[in-house]
Amino acid sequence: MALVISREDSISVPESSPPEVGEKKNFGKSRPFYPELESLRGVAALAVVLLHIVLVVTNDGSGLLGPEALSRMGWDKFLFTQISVIVFNGRAAVVLFFVLSGFVLSIGFDETKRLDGGTYTRFLVRRAFRLFPALWATVVLSVLVGYFLAGQHYSLRSITSYFLLIDLSFAPPTWTLVYEIAVCIIYPFMFFAIRQQTVAMQTVALVGVSWFLRNWPVVIHYGQVQGELPLVAFSLGICTPTVGHEIILRLRHCRGVLAVLAVALIFAPESLRWYADFHPQIVRFIDVPAAEFYSQFGCFYLLSWIAFGKPRSRRSLQNDPPWPSGDGLTAFTFCMVPCCGQSPHSMDMWTGRSRD
């Protein structure tokens, strides 16, 4: 998973604190900051990194983790790897990133306006400057390391294919960038088509689009990447500030229980896949692709609950940057789980003063 945190992707806001549940937010004119979501993204990124470390160390990076891996790994490595795959759950982290990307990108638009050529061009230029410099720096670093430390030689054609994401052998986890770039081309059209409707119509559209893409997915084939575009995940992210907010408001008495069910839904595909590998006779009763599809809705509800649910299960320690306004700037946060009987609070990491 290729992860880069920069100005465009920081979930940041003006200096005012996040509004309470029920308070309306103007997502086009202000940039709300959700430190919990920033922290969740950090935890998901760490899970992806740890998963790749485990796969490289115990399984030579192979994705073959079924019963056939037991004979060559031994029980100790095999059990450790299986537990790591389920706990760190890289696939769920990728889905979470896609939903969160749809949510974060929506903050930069004003749904009260119309999409014009200038808005579309500015969006693509910002995304290009957000994605490609970091990608190209990674390519240069990978080529230098391969040349000086591993003695590898690269042709101009291979380096060019690296820069254009046609050949991902220099960094296989960058496959997610291909999907990100492809979705970004149509994202502004998706945003304005969805968010300029009422919440009720957004809900109907979301259900209809999800059903359609479940049966007729949009497939991309570029270089070494071939698969379904995560259009449902990005659509869910677009609807998080509206439909997700409304769901949290209306289900205030059971939203905590639903959050637990959402987490179970997120972890279900990997658990079912593991169970099906060891019990082939019941594979016909387990629809893992369907579980993966519906796990997107688990991510959608979890993000909505964290962003808009009160009381939250945790608050966060937020380090405000030492510049006047935090609008659009990168911030790093730490989650703090309150002890029993202790009121959660947040602190300014620069001054040490309580912010409550």
Image (cartoon, rainbow, N blue to C red):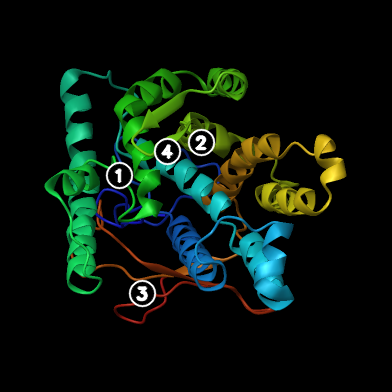
Q: Say which residue label 3 marks.
A: 348
Write down the residue under mark 2.
233
- The outermost residue toward the right is 281
- First along the sequence among labels 2 and 3: 2
Distance between the Cα atoms at labels 2 and 3? 33 Å
Separation of residues labelled 3 and 4 (CA atoms): 29 Å
Regarding mark 3 in the picture, which secondary structure is present there?
loop
Q: Secondary structure at mark 2?
A: helix
**Mark 1 touches mark 4? (CB < 8 Å):** no
Number of other residues with Cα within 10 Å of mark 2, as a class: few under 14, some 14 to 19, many 20 or more: many
Disc number for residue 167: 1
Q: Which of the pair 306/279 is nearer the observer?
A: 279
231 horizontally vs 208: left or right:
left
Of callouts 3 and 1, the N-terminal one? 1
Above or below for 228 versus 127: above
> Which-is-in-front pick, marks 2 and 3?
2
Q: Amino acid at mark 2?
A: Ala
What type is the residue that disc 3 sits on?
Answer: Asp
Residue neighbourhood size for the residue with mark 4, other residues' Cα within 10 Å, grouped as few (<14), some (14–19), many (≥20): many
Disc 1 vs disc 4: which is toward the camera? 1
> Which residue occupies 47% across, 66% down?
46
Q: Which mark is in front, 2 or 4?
A: 2
Q: CA distance from mark 1 to mark 4?
A: 26 Å
* Label 2 to label 4: alpha-carbon separation: 7 Å
Q: Which amino acid is tagged 1?
A: Asp
